Amino acid sequence: MANLMNELVSGVVQSVLKEILKKAGGTTTTKRQKRQTRSATTGRFKKATTTKAKPAKKQVSCRRTAASRSKTR
């Protein structure tokens, strides 16, 4: 009886593992690549130059004063 239960459980575990591994593989989409530009003089591919990150601009509050709000436009 124990052998039968052991065989049944191992069969179920094997089938579940097989199902999980089957679904897990390679479902991601392919990445799009940009075309490489060639150098006009040498004809070789140009290396991509990285641009420096600009520092963030300070936020400026544009709140109007009570006097300016009360004026009619």
Image (spheres, grey):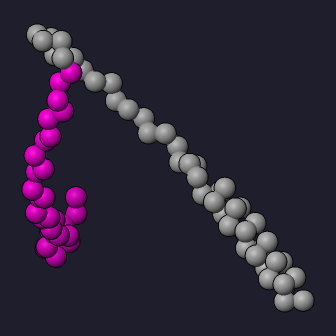
Extreme-right residue of the structure: 1
Magenta includes 46?
A: yes
Q: Quadrant of residue 57?
A: bottom left
Q: Quadrant of the C terminus?
A: bottom left
Magenta includes 72?
A: yes
Say if 4 sits above or below 47 in the image: below
Q: Nearer the viewer, residue 54 or 17?
A: 17
Q: Nearer the viewer, residue 42 or 6?
A: 6
Tell me which residue sits at (14%, 35%) in the image: 49
Place of residue 23 in the rendered image (x, y in percent of width and height, measured from the top left): 65, 56
Q: Quadrant of residue 19?
A: bottom right
Magenta residues? 45-73
Q: Quadrant of residue 72?
A: bottom left
> In the displayed structure, does residue 22 sit left or right of residue 58?
right
Tell me which residue sits at (70%, 62%) in the image: 18
Extreme-bottom residue of the structure: 2
Magenta segment main secondary structure: loop
Q: Quadrant of the N terminus?
A: bottom right
Tell me which residue sits at (58%, 52%) in the image: 25
Place of residue 51 in the rendered image (x, y in percent of width and height, measured from the top left): 13, 41
Say if 48 sits above or below 60 in the image: above
Say if 35 sits above or below 5 in the image: above
How many numbered circles does the render carry? 0
Place of residue 31 in the rendered image (x, y in percent of width and height, measured from the top left): 44, 39
Tell me which residue sits at (21%, 21%) in the image: 45
Q: Nearer the viewer, residue 39 or 66?
A: 39
